[in-house]
Image (spheres, coloured by chain):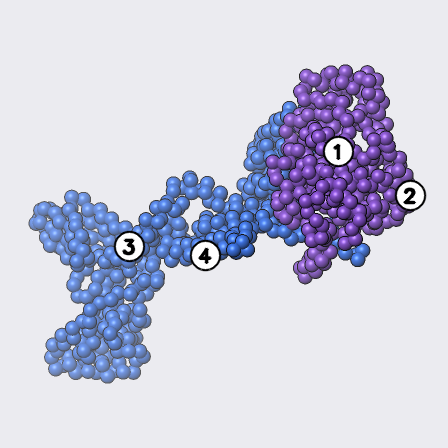
Chain colours: A blue, B purple
């Protein structure tokens, strides 16, 4: 029993548990909140504006606009309406926005704004009932003949029947039968309807699909059309030009079937035009929407990502400290180098992150060098300890002040970065260097400075990485893992690397 | 990387104690934190030693407050020579040895001449915590000077060496003495170039001598043959170490002992976190010595019995 619950074993169990916990919550955050391991992952958001315009003819107005259904699959973040003097409701059964108003006249504008994001993994997975067999079109003899010709000609095209037909209808120059079959100067919609009729002839249910292609900067265009045909137990979408199957990237469906996209009662010359604006947002901002969509917002509210941004930024900074601490522990207990003060290197590294490495190193070197020179003068005065270190603190403040002023006036970034260094820590470094220098010689002082800087730089490279900072913030449970690693290192009884060198001569004697 | 494991494995075979293992397995396991003040504060150590019947340097006076500093000359009046040291100092830091003085002029052991003001300043520094472990306020201790035995005279360049004994659960486990050299600047720190001499725990005779990690046979300055070094009154040295265990209850301690030519061995200070350099001086591992004690040495013996056991046993 005792062996089973020894300090080290207990810590190992806890470490394993914390690893499992961190792994699970990372999985959870990635799956439900769409967090990413890499920093700066942005999610594309599209703002679709539907602009309905018509002329009112002086009667009660009722406008119906088909909208995408609000469900997980349809990745809608927000709906917004701007319609002056109109009352509006949403009929959730038919997914239509209904705008009503009493008698009015003249040009009317209604805006419907939809914010959607690209939820790739659930795109187009809509289940629907098996449709009834389509009603066959009624053709006269001549039309029937042409239809047969077209169907025969389509055999030579590639793909399945809908694809073959679409391809035939897009041939250039157009097949003679097709040209004769279509009305003169047929538009896209008329061609699609012709294809649907021909499919019905072959007992393939098909319908029109209206939607909007999410292309950035798309302005005031009418709805995009696609054809949907039911084959082998599934509705499949086809592009009306390329005959390509499947929902294209960035296509949002508004309405299916022959029912209209827009119905206006009490108005004429109605049209709906869509414009699309792409905007980019970070995955953290999206996480809240995601959590709502996946019904995990209860947990989300108690996560740090729900805090005000100011606090989040402080936490983002704090979350990376445990890694810096781990570096210090490794340098001290596993490598075994002497540093000035336990966490001094980490604090210096933190300043370097703010000043930038090059500027920070030069500036810090300058402060410490001037500080040591002044401290050298001070030691001649034989002051008592506390007043002496206090004087050094004031020296440091004065040096920083001077450097900042010089930096500002001569536009030297190196010099003005002085303000980022912690005053007390810098003062103690100066004091430590001077004392070590006096008592143990310049060689030991240099050694301590060297290893302090090595530790500071190692810490710097860990905490300065945007990648690591993001990771530690997004998956902050990792800090629990680090805690147990640090505690386990507290039971490490092996040699430090520097001790191997120190005791190496003992091996030669044997 | 492979080399690292190879060296590590060989050192382990030799029973070399590393810093992490020392702290984890011995210091934190055997030395209770609440006992540290007993050895960190030389004033307390002295009181305890007196009770335990351990010979130690005699105290002339204590200076606890800044206003007492100006009276220190009255304190030492009648003592032609004295030592000022911080009560919480370690490793000889802040120790000032005055071998001759009058009202204005103080001559140190290394023939430096100091003014009254300089000595006054030194005591002030001690009080303000310059030499104490955590930088906290300290007490200055004024002691009689030790008249060092002249057996070490030809073995040391300046300064007089002391004997360090590592005591594990009351049993002296390993011993050494450190000899200052010109290279070490008269200091007794091995990493600064002093000679470390491992002493046979049974006899007090030289086992090995090491300087800068290399075995040597001659003192580099005095040219004395280090093999001839033999610490007199060795049993008394061991007894001080053994008694220190009962006195402090520290299971793992280092005792620093000096030899006075009239009063015999005297305890200078005790250390609850003794360093690892003793292994280099002895060219031997502490773990090996400690395992031996755990395995074969009887428990519940008096200090005298333990010393006798060490002197007579052959394992």
Query: Mark on residue B224?
Result: 2
Seen at 35% across and 62% down, the residue is: A121
Q: Residues within 10 Å of mark 2 (few under 14, many from 20)?
A: some
Q: Mark 4 or 2, which is nearer the eye?
A: 2
Whether the residues at callouts 4 and 2 have beta carbons within 8 Å, the answer is no
Q: Mark 1 or 4, which is nearer the eye?
A: 1
Q: Label 1, label 2: how many angstroms apart (C-alpha)?
A: 32 Å
- Name the residue that disc number 4 marks: A20
Residue B59 visible in the displayed image:
yes
Seen at 38% across and 46% down, the residue is: A303
Query: Does label 1 or label 2 sit earlier along the sequence?
Result: 1
Q: Label 4, label 3: how many angstroms apart (C-alpha)?
A: 34 Å
Q: Label 1, label 4: how many angstroms apart (C-alpha)?
A: 58 Å
Which chain letter matches label 2? B
Seen at 18% across and 78% down, the residue is: A203
Q: Residues within 10 Å of mark 3 (few under 14, many from 20)?
A: many
- Name the residue that disc number 3 marks: A76
Q: Is residue B97 above or below residue B249?
A: above
Which chain letter matches label 4? A
- Name the residue that disc number 1 marks: B54
Whether the residues at callouts 1 and 4 have beta carbons within 8 Å, the answer is no
Q: Label 4, label 2: how many angstroms apart (C-alpha)?
A: 65 Å
Residue A272 at x, y percent in the picture: 21, 56
């Amino acid at each position: 029993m005792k062996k089973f619950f020894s300090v080290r074993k207990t810590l190992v169990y806890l470490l394993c548990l914390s690893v499992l916990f961190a792994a699970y919550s990372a999985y959870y955050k990635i799956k439900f909140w769409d967090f990413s391991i890499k920093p700066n992952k942005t999610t594309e958001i599209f703002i679709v504006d539907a602009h309905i315009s018509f002329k009112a003819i002086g009667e009660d107005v009722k406008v119906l606009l088909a909208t995408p259904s609000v469900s997980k699959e349809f990745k809608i973040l927000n709906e917004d309406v701007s319609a002056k003097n109109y009352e509006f409701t949403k009929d959730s059964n038919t997914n239509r926005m209904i705008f009503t108003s009493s008698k009015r006249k003249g040009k009317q504008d209604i805006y419907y704004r939809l914010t959607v994001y690209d939820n790739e993994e659930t795109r187009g997975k809509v289940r629907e009932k098996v449709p009834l067999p389509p009603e066959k079109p009624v053709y006269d003899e001549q039309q029937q003949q042409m239809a047969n010709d077209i169907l025969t000609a389509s055999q030579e095209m590639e793909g399945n029947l809908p694809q073959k037909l679409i391809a035939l209808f897009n041939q250039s120059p157009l097949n003679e039968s097709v040209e004769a079959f279509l009305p003169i100067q047929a538009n896209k919609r008329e061609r699609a309807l012709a294809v649907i009729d021909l499919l019905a002839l072959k007992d393939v249910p098909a319908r029109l699909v209206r939607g909007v292609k999410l292309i950035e900067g798309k302005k005031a265009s009418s709805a995009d059309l696609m054809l949907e045909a039911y084959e082998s137990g599934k509705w499949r979408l086809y592009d009306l030009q390329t005959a390509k199957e499947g929902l294209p990237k960035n296509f949002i469906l508004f309405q299916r079937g022959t029912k209209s996209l827009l119905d206006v009662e009490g108005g004429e010359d109605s049209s709906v035009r869509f414009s699309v604006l792409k905007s980019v947002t970070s995955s953290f901002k999206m996480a809240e929407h995601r959590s709502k969509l996946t019904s995990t917002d209860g947990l989300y509210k108690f996560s740090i990502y729900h805090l005000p941004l100011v606090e989040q930024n402080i936490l983002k900074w704090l979350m990376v400290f445990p890694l810096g601490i781990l570096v210090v522990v490794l340098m001290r207990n596993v490598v075994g180098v002497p540093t000035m003060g336990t966490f001094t290197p980490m604090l210096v590294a933190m300043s370097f992150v703010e000043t930038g490495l090059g500027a920070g190193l030069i500036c810090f070197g300058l402060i410490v060098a001037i500080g040591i020179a002044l401290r050298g003068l001070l030691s001649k005065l034989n002051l008592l300890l506390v007043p002496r270190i206090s004087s050094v603190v004031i020296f440091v403040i004065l040096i920083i002040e001077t450097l900042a002023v010089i930096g500002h006036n001569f536009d030297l970034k190196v010099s003005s970065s002085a303000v980022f260094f912690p005053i007390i820590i810098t003062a103690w470094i100066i004091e430590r260097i001077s004392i070590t220098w006096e008592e143990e010689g310049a060689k030991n002082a240099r050694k301590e400075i060297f290893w302090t800087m090595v530790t500071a730089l190692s810490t710097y490279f860990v905490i300065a990485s945007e990648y690591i900072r993001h990771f530690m913030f997004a998956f902050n449970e990792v800090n629990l893992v680090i805690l147990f690693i640090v505690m386990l290192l507290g039971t490490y009884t092996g040699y430090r690397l520097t001790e191997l060198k120190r005791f190496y001569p003992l091996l030669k004697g044997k | 990387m492979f080399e690292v494991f190879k060296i590590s494995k060989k050192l382990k075979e030799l029973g070399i104690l590393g810093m992490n293992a020392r702290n984890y397995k011995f210091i934190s396991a055997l030395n209770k934190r609440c006992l540290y003040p007993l050895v960190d504060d030389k004033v307390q150590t002295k009181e305890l030693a007196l009770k335990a019947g351990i010979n130690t340097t005699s105290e002339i006076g204590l200076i606890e407050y800044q206003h007492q500093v100006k009276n220190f000359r009255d304190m030492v009046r009648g003592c032609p020579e004295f030592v000022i040291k911080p009560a919480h100092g370690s490793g000889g830091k802040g120790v000032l040895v005055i071998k001759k003085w009058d009202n204005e002029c103080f001559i140190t052991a290394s023939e430096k001449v100091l003014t009254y003001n300089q000595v006054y300043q030194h005591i002030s520094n001690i009080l303000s915590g310059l030499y104490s472990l955590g930088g906290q306020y300290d007490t200055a201790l004024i002691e009689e000077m030790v008249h060092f035995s002249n057996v070490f005279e030809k073995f040391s360049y300046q300064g007089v060496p002391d004997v360090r004994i590592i005591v594990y659960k009351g049993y002296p486990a390993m011993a050494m003495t450190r000899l200052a050299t010109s290279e070490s600047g008269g200091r007794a720190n091995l990493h600064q170039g002093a000679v470390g001499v491992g002493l046979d725990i049974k006899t007090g005779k030289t086992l090995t001598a090491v300087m800068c990690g290399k075995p040597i046979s001659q003192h580099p300055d005095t040219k004395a043959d280090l093999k001839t070094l033999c610490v007199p009154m060795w049993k008394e040295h061991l007894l001080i170490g053994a008694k220190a265990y009962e006195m402090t209850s520290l299971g793992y301690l280092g005792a620093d002992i000096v030899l006075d030519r009239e009063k015999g061995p005297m305890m200078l200070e005790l250390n609850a976190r003794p360093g690892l350099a003793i292994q280099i001086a002895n060219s031997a591992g502490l773990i090996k010595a400690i395992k031996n004690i755990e395995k074969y040495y009887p428990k519940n013996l008096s200090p005298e019995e333990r010393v006798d056991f060490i002197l007579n046993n052959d394992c």
